[in-house]
Image (tube, rainbow, N blue to C red):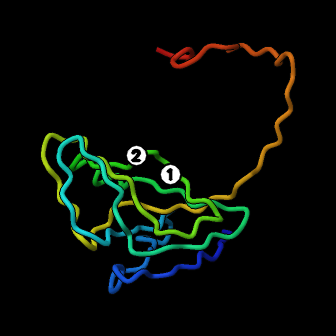
Amino acid sequence: MTSITLQLRRLPHGDALPLPAYATEHAAGLDIVAAETLTLAPGERAAVATGFAIAIPVGYEVQVRPRSGLALKYGITCLNTPGTIDADYRGEVKVLLINHSAEPFTVQRGERIAQLVPAAVQRAAIAEVDVLDETVRGSGGFGSTGR
């Protein structure tokens, strides 16, 4: 298994919080916690502070993904999922949470709110053409291959 090093700078409001960490030996994502306490009303969204900034090696991104337990039990998930943190970003990592439930939900400081998953980035070159090759699907859009 390949690994990379993410440099992490703890911000003042992240003092005493646990660093991002894998919950189990084979976990794909590093659990991260909230650096603030706030209540999300039904339908409300917020950028929740984590209290740290990271430096990602060139050629990688870090994806921000929701925690399945929060989604199942409370209807709390991440917007813009997976969110991408680019290798040249040095600001605070924030998590865009939304409350899809009918009840208010309080995010507690120190509570696990999301996962970070490092991923290799492949850059693409664009080649403008007059015609694209034909496929069975063709230009069929959303839902065109199923019910």
Residue drawn at the location 27% of the way across and 68% of the way down: 111
Q: Are marks 1 and 2 in contact (CB under 8 Å)?
A: yes
Could you tell me residue 25's position as x and y percent? 48, 72
Residue drawn at the location 44% of the way across and 61% of the way down: 115
**Residue 13 horizontal side relative to residue 106, left or right:** right
Q: Which residue is mark 2?
A: 79
Q: Looking at this rendering, what residue extends furthest in the bottom direction?
A: 16
Residue 71 seen in render: no
Q: Which mark is residue 83?
A: 1
Q: Amino acid at mark 2?
A: Leu
Q: Quadrant of residue 129?
A: top right
Q: Quadrant of residue 87?
A: bottom right
Mark 2 secondary-structure assignment: loop
Residue drawn at the location 29% of the way across and 54% of the way down: 69
Residue drawn at the location 86% of the way across and 17% of the way down: 130
Give the position of the N terminus as an image quadrant.
Answer: bottom right
Q: Amino acid at mark 1?
A: Gly
Q: Which mark is residue 62?
A: none
Number of marks present in the image shown: 2
